[in-house]
Amino acid sequence: MHTIKYPFKNFPQDKKIVEVQKGVYWIKILLPSMISHVNVYVLEDDDEITIIDTGLACDHCKKIWSFLINSKFKNKKIKRIIITHHHPDHIGLLGWFVNNFNTEIWTSRSSWLTGRMLTLDKKKTVSNETLNFWLNAGIPFEIVQEKSLEKPFNFIDFVELIPLGYKRVIDKEILNIGENKWIVNLTDGHAPEHITLYSPNLKLFITGDQILPGISPNISVYPTEPLADPLAEYLKSLEKLLKIKDIGYLVLPGHNLPFYGLSVRIKQLFNHHKKAFKRIEDSVSKKPKSAYDIMFPLFKRKIEKHEIDLALGEAVAHLNYLWKSGIIKKEKNKNGINLFVKCT
Ligand SMILES: [Zn+2]
Ligand SMILES: [Zn+2]
């Protein structure tokens, strides 16, 4: 296969589910956030169901789940929730499920620890680490000043408290769910130890946000670890997934439409980053530039103020990758801004 094919032309409508294969259901949950929706999946057995990802902690998401559980899955026990990774759109309602339905939690250690740890943050103002991260990345002082007055992002605003106790899912583990075997591959870059699952007999591949169609997954550096190199981890994880023979898997992603063409999409994502690296290298070939400066060549468009956070994290990720690969070098100017220039 050389192209991506979408067997479903449309998303399931609100409160509707689509059976992508016998006993495997796809639900699109609309989100009241910058991210418009998340896809969640339900695996149904004779007397129980397994849910993959939950949506945000919001009344709308709870209403959808309550409706579906009471109508479609009325007589089934919710045996377990598998969380692909710790981001709020995926883990948000985990606590609600456990408290209301006494379900098991299955996830990776990093997803569970990171999610639980992040619920501790209840910042009233933007942290100093974040302000320094912005300034070091070259965001103009006036914009930093303006942004410093905004309400900071608090994970706990979008996520129910994450319960104590879970089953740790490890790399290459085989999960027996109903009559089917699902093989785990943990991946990094988008989120630490992000779970992907595939079932050769069902020919289904659940990729969460690691592989998405239409958009490239967000690979960002955050103020918590400014020297991180998530792109190196992401590209390594792509290589790992590319080694799995694509026997015509239907890919079930965390966002956008399910598709055929897993290997094709992985290669497209490699190319996407390769081209981005090239544009950045060209941009820093003559004059040292900051992360803020390279946002335009990276995204090939002007970044609006409300997009700066996400875009900047991706810009730093690309620069850190090139810097750690020895392709560009880093220096600080007199104002403390990190500037990057191509090695000669
Ligand atoms: Zn994510
Ligand atoms: Zn997501």
Image: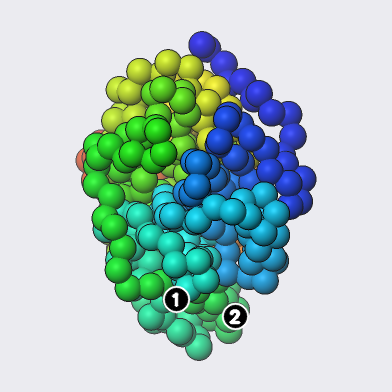
- Tell me the mark number nearer the camera, choosing from 1 and 2: 1
Mark drawn on residue 252? none
Q: Residue at 28% of width from left, 37% of height from top? A: 174
Instruction: Specify the quadrant of the image occupied by residue 222.
Output: bottom left
Could one spot residue 231 in this view of the protein? no
User: Which residue is drawn at the image coordinates 64% and 25% (left, top)?
Assistant: 6
Q: Earlier in the sequence, mark 1 or mark 2?
A: 2
Categorize mark 2 by other alpha carbons within 10 Å: few (<14), some (14-19), many (20+): few
Q: Quadrant of the C terminus?
A: top left
Provide the residue designation for mark 2.
150
Q: At which x and y percent is residue 67?
A: 70, 59
Residue receiving disc 1:
161
Give the left or right position of residue 178, taking residue 72 as reference. left
Q: Nearer the viewer, residue 311 or 78?
A: 78
Q: Is residue 145 left or right of residue 58?
A: left
Q: Residue at x 30, y 68 (%)?
A: 165
Q: Is residue 133 above or below residue 185?
A: below
Q: Secondary structure at mark 2?
A: loop
Instruction: Report whether residue 69 is seen.
Output: yes
Give the percent coordinates (x, y) of residue 40. Answer: 56, 48
In-image side of 143 versus 329 (left or right): right
Q: CA distance from mark 1 to mark 2?
A: 24 Å
Q: Disc 2 residue type?
A: Glu
Q: Is mark 1 within 8 Å of ligand 1?
A: no
The percent position of residue 206, horizontal first and vertical second, equals 46, 37
Q: Residue furthest top?
A: 1
Residue 122's place in the image compared with 139, above or below, is below
Asked whether the beta carbons under mark 1 and mark 2 sit within 8 Å of each other, the answer is no
| SS class, disc 1 | loop
